[in-house]
Image (cartoon, helix red, strand yellow):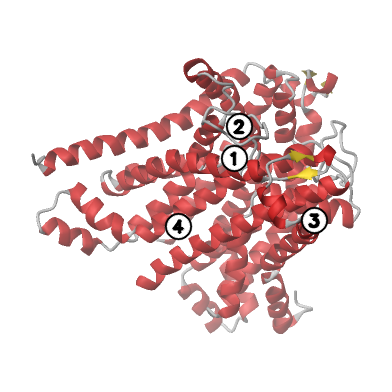
Amino acid sequence: MKLLGERGVQRLLAGIAFSAISALLLIALFIIKEGLPFIIGYGPAKFLLASDWNPQLGRFGIWPMIVASVWVTLGAMLVGAPLGVACAAYLTEFVPRRVMGVVKPTIELLAGIPSVVYGFIGVMVLAPLIRSSLGGPGLSVLAGAAILGVMILPTIISISIDSIQAVPNSYREGSLALGATRWQTTYMVTIPAAKSGIIASIILGMGRAIGETMAVIMVAGNAVKIPGSPLDSVRTLTANIALEMGYATGRHREALFATGVVLLVIIMILNSLAGMAIRKRAAKR
Amino acid sequence: MRIPPKHTQRAAVLVMGLATLFTLAILVFIILFVLEKGLPVVSLKFLFTNPQDMGKSGGILPTLVGTILLTLVAVAIATPLGVGTAIYLTEYTRESRITRIIRFGADCLAGIPSIIFGLFGFIFFVTILKMGWSIMSGGLTLAFMILPTIIRTAEEAIKAVPNSYREVSFSLGATRWETVQKVVLPSALPGIVTGIMLGVGRSIGETAAVIFTAGSSLRMPASLMDSARTMSVHFYILAREGISTENAYGTAAILVITILFINLTAYSLMNRFVAKNN
C-alpha cells in the first residue's frame, strides 16, 4: 500500500466500492441478454399468459408457474406476516429487554438453517401430515406456503423489531399518560408509527418467498398446472428454472433464462417498494 | 357490549406470546429433529471416508473438502471487496449521490434470489469465461452473493469505532490510510469478522447457486478448476433422489451443526464488540 500513496489508496478503494453495483449490473445484464431476446422472439403475451409448458414441443407458456408463485407467496405471507409482526410487537413492547436480547438472535438463527433442510423437514414431516389429515398428494401449495412462511419469519421479525424500537418513547408515554393500556398503545400508537418499516419487512419477506428455490422444489410437488385448491401440487417460477436447467439446451435454455428475467423484474419491483417504504420512514424522522 | 380494555390486553398478550412461543418451538423442533435423526449416523468415519455407490453408503469426505474450498474462495474474494467498500463509504467520502448508488447496489444485490445467482454464474463463469463446472466458478458466484452481507456488517462495525480514536491518530500526524490501517480496522475487526462468518454460513448452506456453477461431481477435487459437490448439494441429491434417507439425515445434521456453530460464534463476537464500544 506504501507504493500507492494516499491518493492511490483512495482511488483503489473508490474502485472497489463499485464492486457491488457492478456485480448487480453484470448479473442483470447477462440474465437479460440471455432471456430477453427469447421473450421478444416468442411473444411476451404468449410467453407470460399461455398455459402450456412443453419444451419438447417448443411450447413455453409460464402462466401456471406465475400463478403458482403468486399462490405460494401469498400463502407464505398469510402464515409469516401475522406471526412475525405479533412476535415483533410482543418482544419489543411486552417483554423485558434482556429476554428480547436472547430471543431475537435465536430467531435470527432460523435464517441460517439452509433452505434444503427446511425443504427436507417439509417432505418428511409436513407433507405426510397434510396428506393424512386433509388429503391430496401432500406436496402442495399448502406445504410450500407453510414452509416458506416459516422461512421468512426471521426477515419479518428482525426488521419489524428494529422499526418498532425506533418509535420514540415519548409517543408511548403520551398514550399511557392518557390512560391507554399497554396493548391499546401498541396497536393504536406504536404499530401505526412503525408502519412503513413493518410494511418494508413484509415486502422483503415476500421477495424472499418468491425467490426461494430449493425448499419449494422439495415440498410443492412441481406439477405444471394451475392450482385449483391449496392441496394441489404446483411448480413455481424458481422451481421451473432449477428443475430443468440441468439438461436444457437451445431454446429451452433460453426460455429458462427468460423465466429468470420475469423473476428478476418481480424482485426488483418488490425491492424498490421496500426501499420506498424504508425511505419514507427515514424522511419522517 | 363493551369489553374492558384490561381483558382485551390480556387476550392480545396471550395471542402474541403464543405466536412467539410457536416461532421458537419451530426452531427448536427443526434443530432437534435433524439432530435426533442425523447424529446416530455421524461418526469420524462418516466424515472422513469416501462415499460408495453415489452416496448410498460410505462417508462424505469429498463434499466436506468441496464445501471448505468453495467457501474459502468465496470469502477470499468477497472480503477485500466488501471491507474495501465499507472503508470507502465510512472513511473516505461523505453521504452523496454516489454513496446512495453504492448502498442501493448492495441492497438490491442482497435481495436477488440464489437461483438467479446460479443462472448468472452458469452463463458468465461456467460458459463465457470457460471455467466450467468448478470450485472457482462456484466460489466466484458465492462471493457475489455474500458481498452485501460483508459490506453491511463491516460498515456498521467501522461506524461504531468512536471518532475520538481517529482524532487522536490524526493529531499524531498519521495520514488517513495509516489511521484506517492501524486504528480503525483493528478496533472494528470483531465486527468485520462477524460479517465474514455470516457469509461463510450462507455459503455452506447455499444450494441453488452452487449446483449450476460448481456442479455435483462426487470425486475428490484435485484443483480449484475441478467440479465439486458441496454438503448442501449432496444432501439435496441424497434426499431428492431418494438415494439414502439415512445418509441425508447425517449430512443434514453436520450442516446444521456447522452453520449454527458459525452463526452463534458470529453473534457472540458481535455482542462482545458492541458491549466494548458502549
Are the residues under marks 2 and 4 on the same chain?
A: yes
Image quadrant assignment for residue A163: bottom left
**Which is nearer the eye, A28 or A190?**
A28
C-alpha distance separating marks 2 and 3: 27 Å
Give the position of the C terminus of chain A as an image quadrant. bottom left
Other-residue count near label 3 (Cα within 10 Å), few / some / many at <14 / 14–19 / ≥20: many
Instruction: Give x and y (percent) for residue B229.
Output: 79, 36
Who's the residue at 48% across and 55% down the image?
Answer: B273
| Dot 2 and dot 1 residues touching (CB under 8 Å) | yes
Q: Which residue is mark 4?
A: A200
C-alpha distance separating marks 1 and 4: 23 Å
Other-residue count near label 2 (Cα within 10 Å), few / some / many at <14 / 14–19 / ≥20: many
Identify the subunit bearing mark 4: A
Q: Nearer the viewer, mark 1 or mark 4?
A: 1
In the image, is A106 to the left or to the right of A243?
Answer: left
| Dot 2 and dot 4 residues touching (CB under 8 Å) | no
Q: Is residue B49 visible?
A: yes
Q: Nearer the viewer, mark 2 or mark 1?
A: 1
Are the residues under marks 2 and 3 on the same chain?
A: yes
Query: Which circle's residue, 3 or 4, is located before the other in the chain?
Result: 3
Q: Which residue is mark 3?
A: A38
**Which is nearer the eye, A205 or A270?**
A270
Disc 3 marks a residue whose amino acid type is Phe
Q: Which residue is mark 2?
A: A220
Query: Which circle's residue, 1 or 4, is located before the other in the chain?
Result: 1
Are the residues under marks 2 and 1 on the same chain?
A: yes
| Dot 2 and dot 3 residues touching (CB under 8 Å) | no
Are the residues under marks 3 and 4 on the same chain?
A: yes
| Dot 3 and dot 4 residues touching (CB under 8 Å) | no
**Which is nearer the eye, B68 or A283?**
A283
